[in-house]
Amino acid sequence: DSGVTQTPKHLITATGQRVTLRCSPRSGDLSVYWYQQSLDQGLQFLIQYYNGEERAKGNILERFSAQQFPDLHSELNLSSLELGDSALYFCASSATGGINQPQHFGDGTRLSIL
Amino acid sequence: AQTVTQSQPEMSVQEAETVTLSCTYDTSENNYYLFWYKQPPSRQMILVIRQEAYKQQNATENRFSVNFQKAAKSFSLKISDSQLGDTAMYFCAFMKPYSGNTPLVFGKGTRLSVIA
C-alpha cells in the first residue's frame, strides 16, 4: 500500500461529459502529480501541485484542469471528454524532494469513454 | 527536454535465470535521478530501485541491481534469480533534482514475462 488514495477506481462515461478524479496524497506529502497512461502515449506527466500551488505543467489539455486543496488532496477535472481521453490516470505524491523522497503512486483511475 | 528510451518492448526469462532490461536517456543536466518502476498486472506503479547521477556506485536492492553508465547515458536493470512475481511492465524514469521535486519522464516500458 503506497498510502496514496485515488477515487474512483473505474469510471465509465460518454463523450462530451465531465468527470472529476480525486487523489489523497500520503500523509505529510506536499507535492501531488498527475500522470496519464494510454496505450499509444505511454506514461505522460500532466500537472504538479506543491502545497496548494501549481508547480509544473506537462502535456495537459486545455479541457483538463486540476487543483490542490488546503488539506492537500487534489482533483483532476476532465471536460468535453473525447474517446481519446480513455486512459489510466495516476496520482503520485512526494514529500519535499530529492532521491530519498521518491514519488509514490496511487492505484490509478481507469477512465473509459464510450 | 529529457527523453528516455527503452528499446526492448518485450522480454522473457526462465524462472531463476537473470535478465537485463535496457534504458538510455538524453539530457544536458549533470545531476539527476534515475528510477525503475514496476507495473504488475494489478497496474500499481511500484518503485524498484533508484540511482543518483553523482554516485558512481551502482544501486542494488536485493535481487535488483543497476548498471549506470553516465558517459553513455545508460541505466540498465538486472534482475537475478527471476521469480514469477517479477512478471510486469518495467518503466525507466528520469528526474531533475530541483527542490520541491520535479516530474518524472518515463520510457515506453518493457513487458517482462517470467516463465516457469
Image: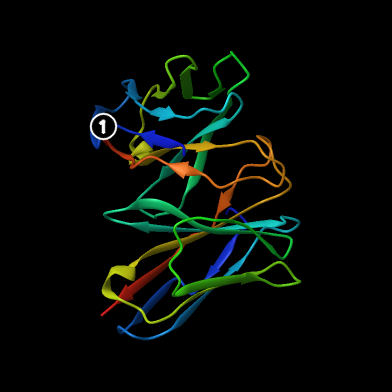
Relative to A74, does residue B59 appear above or below in the rendering? above
Residue marked by disc 1: B8
Give the camera-side residue of A85 and A27.
A85
Relative to A113, does residue A61 appear above or below in the rendering? above
- Residue positioned 25% across, 28% down in the render: B13
Q: Is residue B12 left or right of residue B64?
A: left
Q: Is residue B49 left or right of residue A31?
A: left
Chain identity of mark 1 = B
Give the camera-side residue of B21 and A39.
A39
Q: Position of residue B83 (x, y in %)?
A: 36, 32
Q: Position of residue A76 (x, y in %)?
A: 53, 71
In this orientation, does residue B116 appear?
A: no
Specify the quadrant of the image occupied by residue A100.
top right
Q: Is residue B74 left or right of residue A73?
A: left
Relative to B20, does residue A38 appear above or below in the rendering? below
Circle 1: element type: loop
Relative to B60, does residue A8 appear above or below in the rendering? below
Circle 1 crowding by C-alpha within 10 Å: few under 14, some 14–19, many from 20: some
In this orientation, does residue B33 appear?
A: yes
- Residue positioned 62% across, 42% down in the render: A102
Task: Specify the amino acid type for callout 1.
Answer: Gln
In which quadrant will I find the C terminus of chain B?
A: top left
